[in-house]
Amino acid sequence: MSTFATIADLIGVLAAGIICGTDVFCALVLRPALRHLDDNTMIAVMGRLHQYGDRRLPAPGVIGILAAVTATGAWAASGSPARATAAGCALAVMVAWLSLYLRVAAPINRQLTAAAVAGLTLPNARDLQSRWDSIINARAVLQAAAVACLAASAAIY
């Protein structure tokens, strides 16, 4: 059971690491770079990024959550409460990240994607991007915490 749980932890680390890396890149590189673009270019760039990201990134997100659920259950079943707690903490922060994403980022992503695909200018594009930017640091920290918790779950003896 412990080998199975460790494998789940490591799969979770890899999957959460993909999302974490994406969010850290957005916080450190993309957000400041967008400030130098005109509105139409910003809409085109962010809309197209979200068009692909929102289609492709759910896979590692779901895999990470399933891995955390699996690791939590497997560690609990094997009588390793510290490891189960660490994996459970990863699951909790992933669910918090998902909630933040669904409530704030996803609706903005849809608006920017629709505008980019249609070649439209949004009069509130900067406001939308500012709202999206306002949660990117929190999203990056939550995913980093998930990675750390899953790594700890795998490493605790």
Image (spheres, helix red, strand yellow):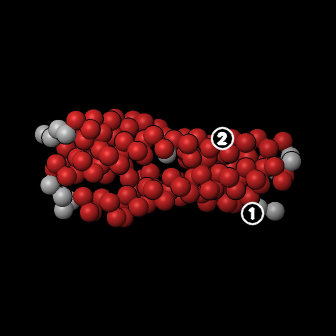
Q: Is mark 2 on a helix, strand or loop?
A: helix
| Amino acid at circle 1 | Ala
User: What is the x, y in percent for residue 140?
Assistant: 45, 56
Q: Which of 79 and 147 is in front in this view?
A: 147
CB within 8 Å, label 2 to label 1: no
Q: Which mark is residue 66?
A: 2
User: What is the x, y in percent for residue 74?
Assistant: 79, 44
Q: Nearer the viewer, residue 99 or 58?
A: 58
Between the C-alphas of marks 2 and 1, the distance is: 19 Å
Q: Nearer the viewer, mark 2 or mark 1?
A: 2
What is the quadrant of the C terminus in the image?
bottom right
Residue 55 horizontal side relative to residue 50, left or right: right
Q: Is mark 1 on a helix, strand or loop?
A: helix
Residue 23 horizontal side relative to residue 126, left or right: right
User: What residue sits 66% from the left and 41% below the top?
Assistant: 66
Q: How crowded is mark 1: few (under 14 residues within 10 Å), some or many (20 or more)?
A: few
Q: Is residue 105 visible?
A: no
